[in-house]
Image (cartoon, rainbow, N blue to C red):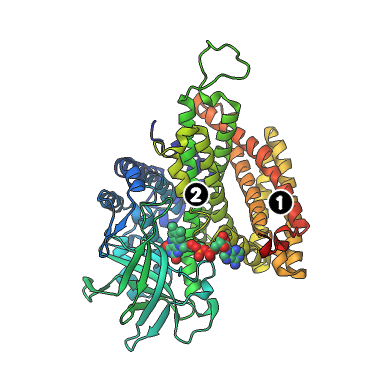
Amino acid sequence: MPATLMNQRDIEFMLYELFDSEALINRERYQDHDRHTFNEVVNTAKAIAEKHFLPIRQKLDTHQPTFDGKKVHLIPELKPAIEAVNASGIGSATADYDLGGMQLPPIIACAAGAYLSVAGGVGMGYNMLTTANANLLEAHGSEALIETWVKPMREGRFMGTMAMTEPGSGSGLGDLSTKALKADDGSYRISGNKIFISGGDHDLSENIVHLVLARVQGAPKGVKGISLFVVPKFLVNADGSIGEDNEVALAGLFHKMGGRAQTSTALNFGEKNGSVGYLVGEENCGLKYMFHMMNEARIMIGTSGAVLAVAGYQYSVDYAKNRPQGRLPSCKDPLSPMVNIIEHADVKRMLLAQKSYAEGALSLVFYGTQLSDDSRTAPTQQQREYAHTLLDFLTPIIKTWPSEYGPKANSLAIQVLGGHGYINEHPVEMFYRDNRLNPIHEGTTGIQSLDLMTRKLPMNKMQGYLATLDEIYKTIEEAKQYDNLQEFTEQLTEAVDTLKLTTQAVLTAMSTQNIDLALANSVKYLELFGQVIIAWLWLKQAIVATKALAEQPHQDDESFYKGKLQALQYFYRFELPKIALWSSLLLNSDSSTYDMQVDWF
Ligand SMILES: Cc1cc2nc3c(=O)[nH]c(=O)nc-3n(C[C@H](O)[C@H](O)[C@H](O)COP(=O)(O)OP(=O)(O)OC[C@H]3O[C@@H](n4cnc5c(N)ncnc54)[C@H](O)[C@@H]3O)c2cc1C
């Protein structure tokens, strides 16, 4: 089977036709670039993915990292692959020039990263966490922290982690108990246990920079008493060389169903004298700073959900085109040749569902990535604030919809391959296993849905919600110009009416009812909202396709655009109508789950 990573035509469509990335070169920050350099970066990532990661992907999946009591062992091929990414500069593509970056737009880095993620399993997770860690420190750290820790991370010499979770504190970070004690020299001594820390130990870099959430002695209980610290594996001497061991002990490695290239570690901090930690920003504001990294990581996780869905879709399309099996119901002649399974309507159903989920999710994560860029680099302050408002509101959906629908797409890819999909000769079962983490980490789906309803919806007098509706209405108005899109504009208008009615109902329920009951179906609200957002983005894609088809493109492009319109139709007829059921549950404050008693299970 050809190892198709991503659909290059679709990446170009997303970058240049759906989101006008080429226009970004008019911004001062990106003035040194043009479409040619953007393509060069994406092509370089693709070449590294194919040369360094793809050949080791299966080995990474089947050879989990091991710990011999002293050191972690990864397969030796991973280090040169990561070094190839660092040498290309893609590892810190979006960073400022003076910090060793290339000042590329995040949407281009996201497209480049898609190839590397799909080819390398989560081998690229080390780089991604490092980038997000460095970005947080750049935004909230002192000059000294940036000089000491960010620079070597940008150069690829150090790597970073985010260390929040503890055995007794997962979704509920307010209960974390890692301690920080202020020392005479202004630094802190950190002690406590963290679990599930990705990239918490390995031999891929000279040092590991942990961003640790801890509670300073005497701090208030709950989230208001959490501070953030840089706690390196090794201290660094005044001249920047590696110094003493900092009492960050690896207590063990977790073995996982997927994502096996990346170590998942239990870390014990400061078992003897306390690990040296350097405060980021102010005491007790740690969670606010960590949200910088978490929000970025949430878009990355949505992206992982989307690109793994694309990879499974691509793979199962190729397979279905080449697997002869059975005949169409209309053919009764046993001597006639078998058809390739892609001819069977039910296989087409599974491929269309995957396409609608995968390319819908991809458009959402590119949209989110562009918003995050706009919130920093759009020409006017007003535009930057508007982008920030939209992004802040949509983050739970950008994280969750691709995370939930990505594994659904991968499950369908397995089904398309039949028994061949269930065995590990084909990567689709691995995509599923890798993708299954995404609805869990960085705030589970349940937690994201509570965040959407209780924080994001009412925030700033519902500005994020209202701005999102405005954006959807703009697209509906534009789509009304095209006869072939009438059915869909009407349906999306009705879907937005349903969303508005449901939103009003949940807000009323939250202010008048028992809050536990009012939030009992929050995941259905998030799913409903997500479904409307994906329907909206499909309509946006359909407008582009409709316009392009009117120009009579050459045959390959004609098929590409017609495929977009068919996926739109599938999503609107098979998927969007599901919101009616979810809405009725929410409108009636259905109490089926709330009423269930613990001892009835
Ligand atoms: C492979 C892997 C990598 C990870 N990487 C990192 C990392 O790098 N850094 C880091 O700090 N952490 C990391 N994590 C931890 C991850 O973020 C947590 O697993 C996640 O936040 C959930 O916490 P938990 O596992 O303790 O589950 P719990 O919090 O026990 O949740 C279990 C279930 O209960 C539900 N639940 C819990 N509380 C509520 C509530 N209030 N309302 C409704 N439902 C609720 C959840 O939605 C979930 O379904 C990683 C985890 C894994 C598995």
Under circle 2, the secondary element is helix
- Residue closest to the eye, 366 or 339: 339
Earlier-in-chain disc, 1 versus 2: 2
Task: Look at 32% across and 55% down and name the residue there.
Answer: 65
- Residue closest to the eye, 92 or 191: 191
Question: Vertically, is 272 above or below 371?
Answer: below
Residue 62 seen in the figure? yes
- Crowdedness of circle 1 by 10 Å Cα count: few (<14), some, many (20+)? some
> Residue 66, located in which quarter of the rendered image?
bottom left
Three-letter amino acid code of the residue under disc 2:
Gly
User: Which quadrant of the figure contains the N terminus?
Assistant: top left
Q: Which percent across, then down, holds residue 238?
A: 23, 76
Cα–Cα gap, marks 1 and 2: 23 Å
Question: Vertically, is 78 above or below 189?
Answer: above
Residue topped by disc 2: 305
Residue topped by disc 1: 582
User: Which quadrant of the figure contains the C terminus?
Assistant: bottom right
